[in-house]
Amino acid sequence: MMSLNVSSNSVNRRLLTNTLRRLYATSIEPVRKEESQEHFEKELKKYDRLTNITKRTRTQKPQREPFVKNLALGIFDHEILTFPEMDLPEVRNVESEVHNISQLLSQKHMANIDTLANKSFRQNLADYRAIALTASQFLDAREACPLEVMRFLETLSEHQLGDNLMHNEMLGCQVLSEFASDGLKKKYLYPVIMGEQLTAFALSEHNMMDVMSMNTKVELSSDKKYWILNGSKSYVVNGASADFLIVFAISEVVTRDKDKETSLTAFLVEKNFPGVSWQKMEPTDIELTEFNFENVQVPTENIIGRLHYGEKILKRVIRDFRLSCGPACTTLSKSMINNLYKTLVKRASEEYDLMATDAIRSKLGETAMHHYAMESVTYLTAGLLDWYQDQDVDVESSIVKVLASEAALKISTTCLDLIGLPATMKNHWARKSHEQILNYLTLHETNDSQRMFIAVSALQHAGVHLSNRIKKLRNPLFHATYNFARMFTQHRQNSDDPKLDLNLIECLHPSLDAPSKQLEYCVKRLEFITEAILMNNGVECVNEHVELRRLADVIIDCYAMTAVIARASRAYCIGLQFADFEVILASVFCNMAIERVRDNVRNIVYDSHKANERSHKAVGKRFVESKGYFIQNPISRFF
């Protein structure tokens, strides 16, 4: 970064200070004097920040083809193997800022705060510019890049209110920063940045499966000055503490033939608007609230973005929220691993006894591997956003959410397994961490729905490029010559021995030769099963949910392998401490991932491996017919 010296010399600073003091010294009443002093401090603080506005010298590269979507076509962008990094001055500056925020959050008066309703807590964060990280510097925010945001979120997640802070940051501030008008930013976002107000993101509803089932709707008033809002929202994080809500509602329903199309619009609704009522939901680690809206008059200028623009806002902000699950899970996982080690050391008579136990060492190494993988995919995805203009990372961010939350769950399960009975205590750190992880698995969207999104997105992308080929494969009688030739060109894929010609090792350290070949194999097999699914099912492939889940798992493994290999190669090449162990972790992860890919490919392609799937479907059908579990008790008899 490079400083811009906006009137930053000491003479101008003294002149401004003396002018402000003379201005506020004219006050006579004591109360007015206190208010003037407080206002003076705010203005002086704002001046200090404006004098330190920085300009980013790094320019983004042109947009590249979507990386993961292209993997389904067997296309691998070698440039992605250059793991993203920041310049050394930027790294030092970020680490210094992160250290200051970490020290602030660890102070006793800050660490014990359990609700964001505490205004002094938010203002302390505002002093360190830890709110609305991506907002403009002219609004006294940090204007951080995606890589910096990930690092700051790791630190914010260390606090017991980390989840609440993340929801405010990634769902509230992000919407206002990206899409709100200048007037709304000045009226609502600036007080949030200053720690004076708090946002809440209201999207979810009870029993809402999709947009069509949303019951929150708006209608334009007769004088066209207000939108009349009616409906309800549930599971609103920070709802009880928030000053205003970002509410998504159906603003238009268009009927075409027998189909209905809906349009969403985002509104900024103050909590004290007439007609807004709320109540807290069951106590959890995250503050959840339920809202009801009855004929709430929302001014037309409170539309965020523009009318019927809600779906595009959602797509963007949910992408960033999925990505933010990475640093949150990373911080939680690292804390669990360190606490596990401390617990095991206390049990051992000597530290050497613990290190000499194969079972314990194996478990600790496995947790390190999971943590390394989730950290790698998080920063690789953030780097893609940081390095390339408007890069399509919708699928990549979903992978981050799925892999990070499930890896954290595996680490949590390991902790519970090794700790045993003490972990059943309500306030034990292992149990509390396990319950916290469940929030990432279920809140807002489930991992199963994310798998469907990952697989369908890849198939849609591949279908556009493979449409002519799929038509020929699905109509062999009309394209006999083409299909006969395919028998020879695809014989290696059919025999599970694809030709490895991607030459990934040319972009990696030689010590990663074996993992690079494993990644090539997985990418080739991903191309194979993508084509097989499209050929066997055509447009009906979106209804083959079991195959879609397996396809998504293959995609996730391929992307995770890319991330860990690229990161380990960079670490080894620049000589990072413990880089040799990074190579070991990357190699072990790839060894395990290639076995999962082999199993998923067999289950998708070969009929001999689909027997279990057919059996499960038959049992499930009977389950539905019986309206519940139908197998008799083991001691039942009829004679």
Image: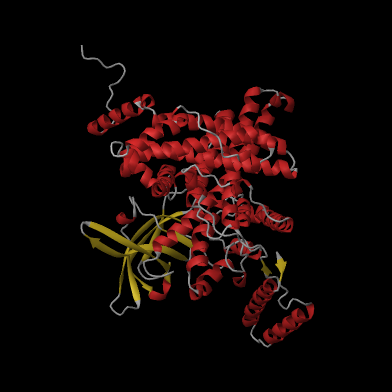
Identify the residue at horizontal 52%, vertical 29% (top origin): 595
From the viewer's perspective, is residue 384 above or below residue 371? below
Give the percent coordinates (x, y) of residue 173.
52, 63
From the viewer's perspective, is residue 14 above or below residue 419? below
Give the percent coordinates (x, y) of residue 506.
65, 41
Identify the residue at horizontal 59%, vertical 46% (top origin): 78
Lateral position of residue 279 relative to residue 385, left or right: left
Q: Residue 430 appears in which quarter of the rendering?
A: top right
Q: Residue 582 appears in which quarter of the rendering?
A: top right
Q: Residue 145 appears in which quarter of the rendering?
A: bottom right
Q: Nearer the viewer, residue 215 or 456?
A: 456
Quadrant of the frame with the C terminus: top left
Coloration mode? secondary structure
Identify the residue at horizontal 26%, vertical 58% (top origin): 260
- The answer to whether any part of residue 545 appears in the image is no
Q: Nearer the viewer, residue 578 or 124?
A: 578
Give the percent coordinates (x, y) of residue 480.
32, 36
- The answer to whether any part of residue 148 appears in the image is yes
Lateral position of residue 269 relative to residue 366, left or right: left
Quadrant of the frame with the N terminus: bottom right
